[in-house]
Image (cartoon, rainbow, N blue to C red):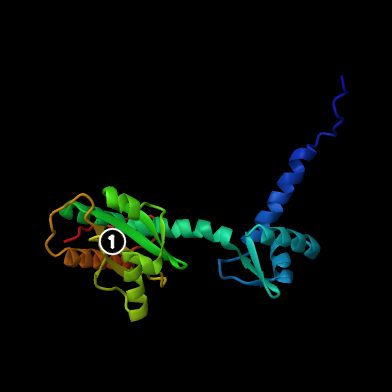
Amino acid sequence: MAAPPQTDGRSTAVAGPTSMVARVTRILEVFAGPYDRLPLAEVSARAGLPVSTTHRILGTLTAHGWVEQTANVYRLGRRTRRFDEGGQHLHLRSIAHPYMHALHVRTGWTVCLSTLVGDDAVCVDRIGGGPSADAAHSVGGRHRVDLCTPGRAMLAVIRGGGAEGGATSGGTGCVAAAFRLPDGRCSAVCLHPGRQTGRLPSPADRLVRTVRLIAAEFTVSRGPGHRGTGAAG
């Protein structure tokens, strides 16, 4: 039987990875946000690490998408922005959900919330369901912004330069209205008939009122924990 390895009280198997994790964490934390761009020397100074060590770790982080390098500066990469994106969506959902629920109760239609991410409209919340709605508006689903009703509604607001827009109709009977968030991002609420076969009186008017209430709620919200309490008309 082989003799157990000699140790001096330190676990090299743990100390190594833990030390590297601590260094990586230091480097990532020096960036104030996704648009903060820093040269190598500044990252090194803020992290309190040697330039050679910082350069080596930044190279690995860049290769795996956690950091991006442009010219002689670094910024947080696409992988870190995924986490930030999730937090932004959580805040958006917390504000919009009560109004979406009220709209669903009044209409019986499926209500979906989408936001613009790059060139795609991403569904981040949905109340209600139905065969066609399940296919077109599943939470987490992405559609090219110019090929879906909520996407076209967001494009109309962006191109028009306003804070919110009127309803945009789609070929499957759905209707969407878009609004801008305080940080400039654009989102849309989509009303879809789903299993409902009867016509809803003035669905666009109800939807636009809901969108205006959600947009107004953002102007008085004070953080991610705030939840709206109003109801759609």
- The reply to whether residue 11 is in sight is yes
How far from the left and from the top, in percent, is residue 42? 70, 70
Tell me the amino acid under the disc marked 1. Answer: Cys
Q: As drawn, is 222 to the left or to the right of 212?
A: right
Residue that appears at 24% across and 72% down: 166
Can residue 137 be spotted in the picture? no
Q: What residue is pinned by disc 1?
A: 190
- Displayed quadrant of residue 184: bottom left
Secondary-structure class at tag 1:
strand
Residue occupying the far front of the picture: 171
Q: Where is residue 175 in the image (x, y as percent from the top left)?
A: 24, 64
Q: Nearer the viewer, residue 148 or 92?
A: 148
Percent position of residue 197, x then y: 15, 53
For residue 71, which quarter of the picture?
Answer: bottom right
Quadrant the N terminus occupies? top right
Given residues 128 and 86, the one toward you in this image is: 128
Tell me the quarter of the image containing the C terminus.
Answer: bottom left
Q: Which residue is drawn at 62% across and 72% down?
A: 37
Residue 171: image x %, image y %?
26, 64
> Foreground: 21 or 166?
166
Q: In this view, does 195 lie to the left or right of 80?
A: left
Residue at 76% from the left image edge and 42% from the top image edge = 15
Residue 45 vs residue 178: left or right? right
